[in-house]
Image: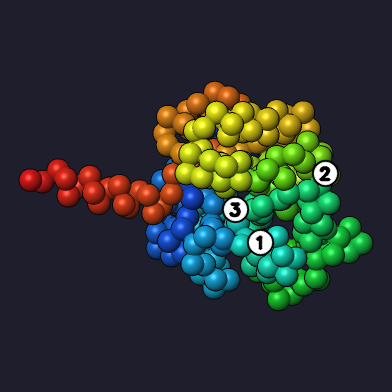
Amino acid sequence: MSIFGDLVSRDRPLIGLWQAFANAYTAEICAGAGYDWLLFDGEHAPNTLQTLLSQLQAVASYPVHPIARPPAGDPVIIKQYLDIGFPTLLVPMVDTANQARELVAATRFPPLGTRGVASATSRASRFGGIQDYLAAAHERTALIAQIESRRGLDAVAEIAAVVGVEAIFVGPADLAASLGHLGNPGHGDVQAAIARILEAAKAADKPCGIFAVDRDDASRRIQQGFRFVSIGTDVGLLAHGAKELRGAIA
């Protein structure tokens, strides 16, 4: 079982925080705040391999699980993210079971998959220091499929059933837009779709996560049965804190 799989199987939900500053200093601050996982965003944040690497190194000594979201399910990008040491990837816009199978293959060395082979030059192998790295890397790597479109919703049961997809994650903002409710993830149609995704994950015996829109939503999602929940972003914390502090002084 992967590290993520072991964590998410615990008897309490995992609480996470989105990282969008692309900065090792802020990542280290957040790593020491008691979250179970941090999501390093390569899709909508200005991250490069170098900024992601520096953040991984900054949080390595803290008891927090690093997850990366690549900008797309590109096998080349997946290979690079794994080589620098991310144990878990959350891939956006997974729309079909066939796409999910290709993503799983991209996380595994041949003959189990299509990932390009690197060991001695790879940080993930401790530069050759992990003797069984090539043989066991797939057992330590977790792939999370993010469902955030009408196509993904329609295929969610098949996606969740794919062997090697370790968990499902809901992206409410894009899902709302895809369903015709841009900027309104609270719409009844979107809420029904979220419940459908959760049930499909449960039916496949896969944990399901979600990006909560606020604190109250996070509490509801935990009660609903989501196993890992993002409760905010580093950017949001700074923006809210700065405004609150300024507003406290007349």
Q: Nearer the viewer, mark 1 or mark 2?
A: 1
134, above or below 198, in the image: below
Q: Is residue 154 left or right of residue 227?
A: right
62, above or below 217, in the image: below
Which residue lies under the disc numbered 2? 162
Q: Who comes first in sequence, dot 1 or dot 3? A: 3
Q: Who comes first in sequence, dot 2 or dot 3? A: 3
Q: Amino acid at mark 2?
A: Val
The one of 201 and 27 positioned closer to us in this rendering: 201
Q: Are marks 2 and 3 in contact (CB under 8 Å)?
A: no
Q: Nearer the viewer, mark 2 or mark 3?
A: 2
For this orientation, the residue located farthest to the left is: 250
Q: Within 10 angstroms of label 1, few (less than 14), some, or many (20 or more) residues?
A: some
SS under mark 1: loop
Q: Amino acid at mark 3?
A: Ile
Kindly identify the residue that appears in the image at 43 percent across and 61 percent down. 21
The one of 117 and 78 positioned closer to us in this rendering: 78
Q: Amino acid at mark 1?
A: Ala
Disc on res. 72: 1
Q: Are marks 1 and 2 in contact (CB under 8 Å)?
A: no
Alpha carbon distance from label 1 to label 3:
15 Å
The one of 175 and 242 positioned closer to us in this rendering: 175
Q: Who comes first in sequence, dot 1 or dot 2? A: 1
Q: Is residue 84 left or right of residue 100?
A: left
Kindly identify the residue that appears in the image at 52 percent across and 32 percent down. 187
* Rendering coords of residue 68 (x, y %): 60, 57
SS under mark 2: loop
Which residue lies under the disc numbered 3? 67
User: In which quadrant of the rendered image does the C terminus lie?
Assistant: top left
Q: Within 10 angstroms of label 3, few (less than 14), some, or many (20 or more) residues?
A: many
* Rendering coords of residue 169 (x, y %): 64, 42
